Amino acid sequence: MDEALVLLAGGDAELFRIIGRTLAISGMATLLAMLLGVPLGYALARGRFPGRTVLLGAVNTGMGMPPVVVGLVVWVLLTRSGPLGGLELIYTREAMVIAQLVIATPLVVGFTAASIQALPPQLPDLLTSLGAGRLRQLWILSREARLGLLAAVMAGFGAIISEVGASMTVGGNLRGSTRVLTTAIVTETSRGNLPVALALGCLLLGLAFAVNLLLTLIQQRRNG
Amino acid sequence: MEVAAEGLRFERGGRTVLDIAALEFGGGSTTAVFGPNGSGKTTLLRLIGGLERPSAGMVRIGGAPVGRDPASRRHVSFAFQEAVFVGGTVRRNLDLALRLRELPAADREARIAEAARECEIEPVLDRSARQLSSGEAQRANLARALALRAPVTLLDEPLTGIDRVTRVQLLDDLPRMLATFAATTILVTHDREEAFRLADHLVVLVEGRVRAAGPKASVYARPADRTTAELLGYTVVRAAGRTIGVPAGAWVLGEGEPGFAMLVERVVDMGNHLHAVGLADGVRVDLRLRAGEPLPSPGERIRITARACVPVG
């Protein structure tokens, strides 16, 4: 930890850039996962359509999907010779956001579906009868399910800020471009630079804790 | 505002839940849709409220068809069987309902105060809605629906799930509450007493079809068929080649016309009076014994007479 404090106190520009990049990539992936996952989770919780149970099963499976497998699939899609190779996204931050989005979305969908299903089943009917449109309903139900939704954010963000397999595979761990805290830890470990690796690990934990503490404070304050 | 169902059919899982050729609810009337569990009562209410899409036909409110768009539900307020609330106080729940109907803040406050006073929930207005007793919750549920002052008020089993004392109080208070706030009211119930005490019109629904509809006195005076008669509380028997309905309490001990032989199964002590229960004409009969009448024994055959009856069918 001393190493990390020395780097931080010394104003190590690359370290600050890595922290900023880590937060930006995982933050963007979490935001997109929320935008995609909350309506999907709501539809899965409330909708009655053929294949819904199979879809819920798939989402639950996705919640435990190994990041390295996600990374591999995204790499196959984005690599120069892959079906989406023309987009030239491989080894970019955008590719890392996509991979992290794939990891976080099932978690957000699953947590959202569970929290919406935990609400009184007649609540959507009540809101419909009162004249609330779909968006207004989604907003009111999201407020009612806010504990579960904030848990979804925490689960999604927690999963992707700490994953290394997908980021390494699709980002390439390029210094100054796609290196994030987890891939930096791998790099320093492989170089035998264990004190720095440990220091970065502590930083990562501290960062994850700070973000989750902030979300927990919001969750508990609104609940109080 | 009048409500009309035209060629209304609703199917679920390949089964016809509701099939109504034509049915009208007059503007300003209070109608009880009455029938056994699973007869399609709540489905009818949900179709009127625009919460379900009919498989065929339509519902019109004030001549305009009910659709799934929020605007077409503006004429309707719905009190669900189970009192459901969003988190927060009773006041917040009433306010949310009024906000969704786009009432200005000053009007909302006045409406909440009025509904709270009439529905007697003033003491619990600032309490958490999810921590109310069942009776308080049902009053808050009704207050929320009535505060909207919608032209059509739909009540789904408004007195279900509450204790007996509260139910009796609410049964007394509800007509006043409806008179204050509601114009056309349609309530669903499987309870005969509720239907007769709260409504001026009756719709008898059995297996998704209307068996009888009209002012309650005329529906009661001439039950359309055996099932309707039994739902209305008649004991249906055959006498002199015709089917008649004998109202509850109209059986008396002794010879007379129309008279029947009754095989007594048991005598029930109700505390302040006795009942003889048995079979007459193959139908279960409940005979209230008056003071001084001889006490029959189980297995004994006695003669009984229907003091009043109506034709059935």
Image (tube, rainbow, N blue to C red):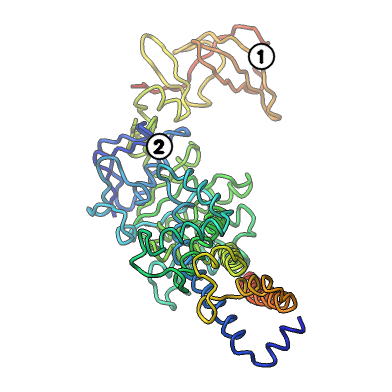
The front one of B17 and A183 is A183
Q: Give the secondary structure at mark 2.
A: loop
- Residue designated by label 2: B40
Do we see residue B112 in this rendering?
Answer: no
Measured along the vertical axis of the image, is residue A97 above or below residue B72?
Answer: below
For disc 2, the neighbor class at 10 Å (few under 14, some 14 to 19, many from 20) is many
Q: Residue at x 36, y 13 (%)?
A: B242
| Residue B11: percent from left, percent from top | 34, 36
Q: Residue beneath label 1, please?
A: B294
- Distance (Cα) linking label 2 and label 1: 45 Å
Identity, as a three-letter code, of the amino acid under mark 2: Gly
Q: Quick one: which residue is furthest to the bottom in this view?
A: A10
In the picture as drawn, the residue positioned furthest to the left comes out as B63
Is A191 left, or right, of B106 in this rendering?
Answer: right
Residue A122 at least partly seen: yes
Which residue corresponds to the image point at 68% horizontal and 11% vertical from the top-left? Answer: B297
Q: Amino acid at mark 1?
A: Pro
Q: Residue at x 63, y 58 (%)?
A: B132
Quadrant (top left/top right/bottom left/bottom right) for the N terminus of chain A: bottom right
Instruction: Give B56 or A20, whichever is nearer the viewer.
Output: A20
Tell me the subunit letter for badge 1.
Answer: B
Q: Nearer the viewer, mark 2 or mark 1?
A: 2
Q: Position of residue B255 (x, y in %)?
A: 52, 10
- Residue A207 at x, y = what percent? 65, 77
